[in-house]
Amino acid sequence: MKYIHLISFSILLAFVSCKTTAEKPSLIFHKSKLERKKNAQFSDAVEAGNTLYLAGQVGINPDTKQLAGNTIESQTEQTLQNIKEVLEHHGSDLEHVVKCTVILSDVNDFKAFNTIFRKYFPKNKPARTTFAADLLVGAKIEIDVIAVKVDGFKDARIN
């Protein structure tokens, strides 16, 4: 009986020590790699463990520093390219996006936006919220995303 108690106590002790020595997830606030955004009052991305929270992106071309045209299609393409670049810079990609929040300046642009969006998320469709509101800098669209880092999961499946 003493032997069983000793084994039980040893297992319990091992379990408790594993719980208390587990590594805490990191919390990293990433500044933008773009010069024009380096002094912004927000982080380009925040990394909490294996999860990335991206700041809202609009359709500004990083080379010209101008909106990529004046159509919802051109701005949606540029916005999603900007998101793709930020994700890849921080170890993720569009296939690992789990949530999108989309803000349209005109709700009537939803169908055209959705056509472009489908091209970027053909298989893994993230959870999404879409609404209309006034946007800054004359943008027609703003999107923020939550994604997991590529090495954070074995695979992504559709159920």
Image: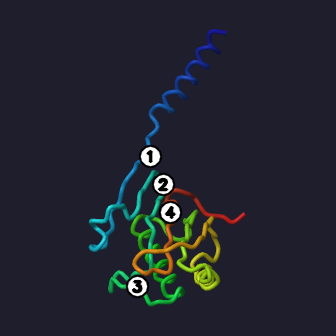
Lower sequence index among marks 3 and 2? 2
Q: Which residue is mark 1?
A: 25
Label disc, if present, on residue 50 of the rendered structure: 2
Mark 4–mark 3 contact, CB under 8 Å? no
Q: Which residue is mark 4?
A: 150
Say which quarter of the image contains residue 88.
bottom left
- Height in image: 95 above or below 14? below
Lower sequence index among marks 4 and 3? 3
Say which quarter of the image contains residue 115.
bottom right
Q: Say which residue appears at 43% left-offset and 65% top-offset.
A: 55
Q: Which residue is mark 3?
A: 67
Q: Secondary structure at mark 4?
A: helix
- Height in image: 122 above or below 2? below
- Height in image: 1 above or below 81? above
Q: Say which residue appears at 39% left-offset and 69% top-offset.
A: 89
Cα separation, mark 2 vs mark 4, equals 8 Å
Lower sequence index among marks 1 and 2? 1
Q: Secondary structure at mark 1?
A: loop
Query: What amino acid type should be assigned to the residue bearing mark 3?
Result: Leu
Q: Say which residue appears at 63% left-offset and 70% top-offset.
A: 124
Cα separation, mark 3 vs mark 2, equals 31 Å
Of residue 149 and residue 63, the one placed in the foreground of this image is: 63
Query: What amino acid type should be assigned to the residue bearing mark 1?
Result: Pro
Lower sequence index among marks 1 and 4? 1
Q: Secondary structure at mark 2?
A: loop
Mark 1–mark 3 contact, CB under 8 Å? no
